[in-house]
């Protein structure tokens, strides 16, 4: 009990979410854009790629939103943006082709495509079809390629489904956040349970085999009782996956979050209680917990991968995707290469100017050092497995891993003894609350500086 109390002392900390290591806050503006082109050219031509496409528009603006998006009531900016995106797809594909043998006419392969945003669901059906046609011109989709799209349920029209089918959708992710009317008003996001259910029913009638729901704790006016009611509604929909995020309140970055009065937000203690209640209820109703904030039905591929220790962390959260190359397209999209990270310019204007001039749109990046790979590997395993195998570390990094292992031993015996312990495999987290992995990761993060940087709350 005392150890649990000591552990909760850490819930007031602000630490990164570690969807990458080093975190995106460390990417450098001084990054040489030629490296982007070189890394694209060096992607092995037989490697099946993962593609992320960012749609930076929404037809509504939720006040809690932390995504890179802009509200638009007109479709023209979206249509104009798609024309630029098509050029970027062609440009990136051309760079990828550079090192293919002269007599090799094969196109680069795609194993996974994810459309995020913003709200890709606001694309018109003919544009989803055109996007797929553009991708088909420049890439070959693997048989069984995973094609996932983030959908705002209130966008969905009968035509949207035709567009999604044409795109090849086989995994849908729906934003829900909370069904409580008081909470919805406070975050400017009206959305009924009935409409959301109708979207899921329709997707299932089309044979879409996997649906994810995003839910948020820590929202204004939420309480354990209110959130428990939302959770029961979500569970009744039986989505294959649930992402249970803690609301990241960062009004110094996202100005519209100032529309949410601070005094309506639950305290860190209340946030922890909501997260724990949700976690337990989801486990009790048959979901398997994955990493810090994901849940999946046991037959789902993410749950299967988690049981085999083969879940990975990327900018969308958790994935079964082992591909070392993730190519991000669109403003703010991040690409991951074996050599390092590259981020496109987040400003749509600057992004458009670069692409229209025939240049790659990267504005920041970071080449990975040997230490970044070692610490990044350890942090990814901690965030995915809630433990870290020392033999795994040594197998992957040899003697280089020794200083890190010594550091972890010190932490487990000292400052973080209430959060982790040593066993015959290595280091294990004593609790699976999401904040625990983030706090432990922050102590081995060689860039983390709580004085100069501000992150969202750990819990
Ligand atoms: C691009 S949106 C999902 C698709 C669609 N735009 C929607 O809202 O339904 C991505 C998800 O990020 C999460 N999210 C957005 N802002 C957040 C914040 N400030 N803190 C934590 N999660 C956030 C929400 O759960 C949201 O569903
Ligand atoms: S939560 Fe989704 S719909 Fe709402 S503003 Fe953010 S990206 Fe757009």
Image (tube, rainbow, N blue to C red):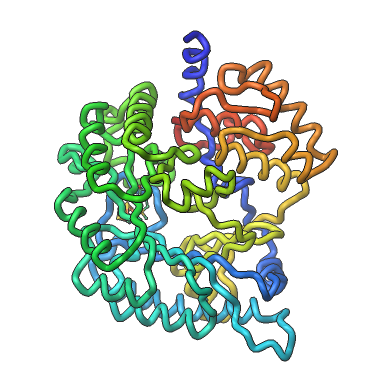
The residue depicted at 72 percent of the width and 21 percent of the height is 410
Relative height, residue 57 to residue 130 (above, below): above
Q: Position of residue 22 (x, y in %)?
A: 63, 46
Q: Position of residue 88 (x, y in %)?
A: 52, 76
Relative height, residue 338 to residue 393 (above, below): below
60 left or right of 130? left
The one of 237 and 101 positioned closer to us in this rendering: 237
Examine the rendering and report whether any part of residue 77 can be seen: no
The residue depicted at 46 percent of the width and 24 percent of the height is 12
The one of 421 and 215 positioned closer to us in this rendering: 421
The residue depicted at 21 percent of the width and 41 percent of the height is 233
The one of 235 and 13 positioned closer to us in this rendering: 235
Ligand 2 placement by image quarter:
bottom left
38 left or right of 13? right
Q: Position of residue 185 (x, y in %)?
A: 18, 42
Q: Quadrant of the C terminus?
A: top left
Examine the rendering and report whether any part of residue 240 can be seen: yes
The one of 27 and 378 positioned closer to us in this rendering: 378
389 left or right of 7? right
């Amino acid at each position: 009990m005392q150890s649990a109390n000591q552990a909760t002392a850490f819930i007031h900390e602000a630490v990164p979410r570690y969807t990458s290591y080093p975190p995106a806050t460390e990417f450098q503006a001084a990054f040489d854009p030629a490296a982007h082109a070189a890394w694209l050219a060096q992607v092995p031509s037989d490697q099946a790629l993962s593609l992320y496409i960012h749609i930076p528009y929404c037809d509504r603006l939720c006040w809690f939103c932390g995504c890179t998006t802009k509200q638009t009531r007109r479709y023209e900016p979206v249509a104009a943006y798609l024309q630029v995106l098509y050029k970027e797809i062609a440009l990136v594909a051309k760079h990828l082709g550079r090192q293919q043998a002269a007599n090799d006419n094969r196109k680069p392969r795609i194993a996974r495509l994810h459309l995020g945003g913003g709200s890709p669901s606001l694309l018109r059906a003919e544009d989803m079809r055109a996007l797929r046609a553009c991708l088909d011109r420049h890439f070959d989709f693997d048989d069984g390629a995973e094609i996932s799209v983030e959908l705002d349920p209130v966008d969905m029209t009968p035509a949207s489904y035709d567009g999604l089918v044409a795109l090849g959708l086989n995994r849908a992710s729906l934003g829900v956040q909370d069904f409580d009317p008081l909470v919805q008003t406070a975050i400017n996001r009206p959305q009924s349970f009935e409409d959301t259910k109708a979207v899921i029913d329709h997707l299932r009638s089309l044979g879409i085999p996997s649906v994810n729901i995003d839910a948020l704790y820590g929202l204004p006016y939420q309480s354990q009782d209110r959130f428990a009611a939302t959770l029961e509604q979500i569970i009744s929909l039986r989505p294959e996956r649930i992402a249970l995020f803690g609301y990241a309140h960062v009004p110094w970055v996202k100005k519209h979050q100032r529309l949410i009065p601070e005094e309506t937000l639950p305290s860190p203690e209340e946030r922890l209680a909501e997260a724990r209640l949700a976690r337990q209820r989801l486990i009790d109703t048959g979901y398997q917990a994955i990493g810090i904030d994901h849940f999946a039905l046991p037959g789902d591929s993410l749950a299967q991968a988690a049981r085999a220790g083969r879940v990975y962390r990327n900018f969308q959260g958790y994935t079964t995707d082992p591909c070392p190359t993730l190519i991000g397209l669109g403003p703010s999209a991040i690409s991951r290469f074996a050599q390092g990270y590259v981020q496109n310019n987040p400003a749509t204007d600057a992004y458009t100017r670069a692409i229209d001039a025939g240049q790659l749109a990267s504005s920041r990046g970071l080449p990975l050092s040997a230490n970044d790979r070692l610490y990044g590997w350890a942090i990814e395993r901690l965030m995915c497995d809630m433990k870290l195998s020392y033999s795994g570390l040594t197998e992957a990094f040899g003697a280089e891993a020794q200083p890190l292992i010594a550091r972890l031993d010190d932490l487990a015996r000292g400052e973080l003894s209430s959060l982790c312990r040593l066993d015959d495999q290595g280091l294990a987290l004593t609790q699976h609350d999401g904040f625990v992995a983030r706090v432990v990761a922050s102590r081995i993060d060689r860039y983390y500086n709580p004085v100069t940087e501000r992150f969202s709350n750990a819990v």
